[in-house]
Amino acid sequence: MREEEIRTHATRVVTEEQREFYFERGYLLLEGFVSQEWIGRLCAATDEMVERSRQVGESDTIFDVEPGHTSENPRLRRVSSPVDQHPTYWEFASESAIVDVAADLVGPDVKFHHSKLNFKWQRGGEEVKWHQDITFWPHTNYSPLTVGTYLHDVGTEQGPMGIVPGSHTGELFNQYGDSGEWVGCLRDEDVSRVAVEEAEYLTGPAGSVTIHNCRVIHGSGKNMSAWGRPLLLNAYSSADAFTYTANAIKSPHDGDIVRGQAARWAHHDPRPCLLPPDWSGGYTSIYAVQQEEQG
């Protein structure tokens, strides 16, 4: 659905000014948006996932762990598709007000794509280099967005996400390396052409929600603080956006309509999109790719 069509629908939970801010700058921050009841439930589910990870010696299809992860000292980087690992995550992703946020920004008919629970473990949680999401999972249009939910308070010292404002309207960059390998981030020479010095770093208390468009350039630094930073991410699109490639974080919920109705017509954006490698067999995480732990 095009922006001019989305504007014809009244917003549910964001203001008209916030919707225009998102269209113009490619992101939105809603501080303290999620209730503390929800945050308590999500944190309890996350504690269960951390306990499960103690039985994992190395990364697998569910848990991506840092080098040095042990049962005594778990250091998670990601839980892939948490909506399939604990019912609370899917209830939140499909029934909570964050879906209404998505509907306000992509149109009333909303499709679920994938989820992930990213961690920046205290005292060394890894950086995420500057990148654009959509070339990991291309769609027929550029409506997809990701809603992030802060489970803990997030300050500048914890490696919060940085967004380059307005970059979603600019160039879509090649995220392959010089030798043709997928690196999942912008090349150094491309970063030099982007105003990363103008990046806005999104901090806020537990329950804050970040929303970023699939084309916007974003990244985050290491977490050298004494506090971890779990970030629950749910990706949605307009119902008229369809994928070109296999979902690397496949879930039985992939393609579920979580608001409104399924589309009968596909919307095709004329701008081209880079294709990723064949991930029909899945992959571990952006951390592993960017740290060159796997191709």
Image (tube, grey):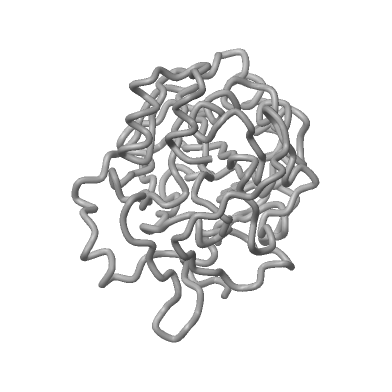
Residue that appears at 72% across and 43% down? 264
Residue that appears at 58% across and 58% down? 137
Residue 185 on image: x %, y %: 41, 64
Residue that appears at 72% across and 58% down? 61
Q: How many marks?
A: 0
Residue 291 on image: x %, y %: 47, 67
Which residue is outermost to the right?
252
Front residue of 204/158: it is 204
Q: Work out whether residue 157 can be spotted.
A: yes
In this view, 257 is above or below 79: above
Q: Work out whether residue 68 can be spotted.
A: no
Front residue of 225/136: it is 136
**75 relative position to 168: left or right:** right
Front residue of 122/159: it is 159
In this view, 207 is above or below 277: above
Residue that appears at 65% across and 52% down? 242
Residue 277 on image: x %, y %: 60, 73
In this view, 287 is above or below 295: above
Corner quadrant of residue 31:
top left
Residue 71 on image: x %, y %: 68, 49
> For the C terminus, which image quadrant?
bottom right
